Image (tube, grey):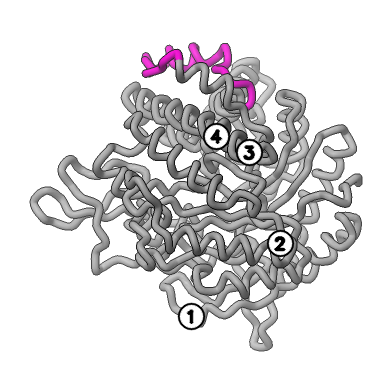
Amino acid sequence: MSFQENFLWGGAIAANQAEGAWNEDGRGPAKTDVTTGGSVKEPRYVTFIDKDGKPGKVINGQPIPEGAKYAVLDDYYYPNHDGVDFYHHYKEDIAMLAEMGFKMFRLSISWSRLYSHGDEDQPNPKGVEFYRSVFMECKKHSIEPLVTIWHFDTPLYLEEHYGGWNNRQLIDFYVRFATTCFKEYQGLVKYWLTFNEINNTIMMLNLFGNHAGDKEHQQGYQQLHYQFVASAKAVQIGHEIDPNNMIGCMICGITFYPGTCDPQDIMANRHMWEKSIFYCGDVQCKGKYPTFAKRLWNEHHVQLDITEQDLEDLRNGCVDMYTFSYYMSSIETTHETDDMVSGNFAAGARNPYLTYSDWGWAQDPLGLRYYLEMIYDRYEKPIMVVENGLGAYDTLEEDGSIHDDYRIDYLRDHIKEMGKAIDNGVNLIGYTTWGCIDLVSAGTGEMRKRYGFIYVDKDDQGQGTYNRYRKDSFYWYKKVIESHGQDLD
């Protein structure tokens, strides 16, 4: 396996799942702050007070009633409020990452920590300084930050007063936020991602199946267009401020397989790749909408608000690298099946050739190599895998140890396939495992669904010391990095 000595080994977290300090030092709320805890069986809810003053909730992802206001209610637990308190533990946490030998640490900047409402002219100085301190700490330990500018955390004020990404004005607000990031952290941050898992807007439409009609598709594709333009403008500005900046897209990567060799399944599978994966990647990497975009729009009578300036910005704002998350593969079939499974913003038929995690996610290392080779052939840009990992139940033993062989097995198998992809010509330059420090699950809001090399003593009700413990995988990954990916035992 041919991992280069300058390969960027590391791990990843997100502000809204790790930082905590949700209302400290001038930070404004995001939608995650009005989202309750859930479980694999119980959905997460978004809470509100309706126009008559009555409290209520809707399943996360559904709109709140007209005239209602998002609200934090006394009777609910909001796990993102405290996260794992990275805000107050970042020096300790980064030192532990350095102990593992991290070359790269992926994290996000909370938009509402820099601009509490999102539409202010000037950023919050305390927010700016917090991230400067974090990046200085990374520099002290010779770790390259990989910074996600938007990671599912549009300021709640912009959602309520502007309609969120349904409003073209958000392009300008985002560009101001991104420009602040590029200017303030010039020389400290070189690697940037504009939008996390930008294709999840489409993934959500797929998840709701036939329930998502023309209205939902019109809204989804329009939101995406505004995000594409915002990303393209940010790429141009980021390059103007510092030509050394490497700015990437970030796609929720899922390898789709046809369920049978029925030509209907083969075509359905191709269309799933086009809609779910290539649509966003093509716009951000090639600077234009793909030929199949018209078919996708026509299927739901979508009429986009697109200007000539938008198209020019897309052409001039192509990303420098393609990054993606990968946890699982999925099956696409036109045939009836009773055996369905769900995963990272996707649902499909069970694959009898794969094993599944406690949360029903297919474990498919070969699917990662398939995806890498498919994407590199399509775009020929440097690639990073910026999320990958196993969410699992961990047990903290009395002596403070955590034996997570299952996680080591999962990561080992995926690293092997990455090595084969590199041998086959893929220009893979970095790998950041997801949740290198245990954090609040985005999907379920649980703590018990743990990904980290570092265990955080917090439970699903928010109880615990927040102390950090090294898992067995901590020492294993340290060895992997030291050996440039050669020692995987």
Q: Nearer the viewer, mark 3 or mark 1?
A: 3
Q: Name the residue located 32 percent from the left edge and 57 percent from the top edge.
A: 34
Question: Which secondary structure, mark 2?
Answer: helix
Would you name the residue on which mark 3 appears?
Answer: 247
Quarter residue 439 falls in: bottom right
Disc 3: CA contacts within 10 A as few (<14), some (14-19) or many (>=20): many
The residue segment tinted magenta is: 285-308
- Amino acid at circle 1: Gly
Q: Nearer the viewer, mark 2 or mark 3?
A: 3
Q: Label 3, label 1: how many angstroms apart (C-alpha)?
A: 38 Å
Would you name the residue on which mark 4 appears?
Answer: 237
Task: Give the mark, 4 or 2, whose residue is nearer the N terminus.
Answer: 4
Quarter residue 344 falls in: top right
Task: Give the mark, 2 or 3, whose residue is nearer the N terminus.
Answer: 3
Q: What is the count of numbered marks?
A: 4
The percent position of residue 487, horizontal first and vertical second, equals 90, 60
Is 111 left or right of 394, judged from the image as shown? left
- Amino acid at circle 2: Arg
Would you name the residue on which mark 2 appears?
Answer: 407
Mark number for residue 75?
none
Would you name the residue on which mark 1 appears?
Answer: 464
**Magenta segment includes 54:** no
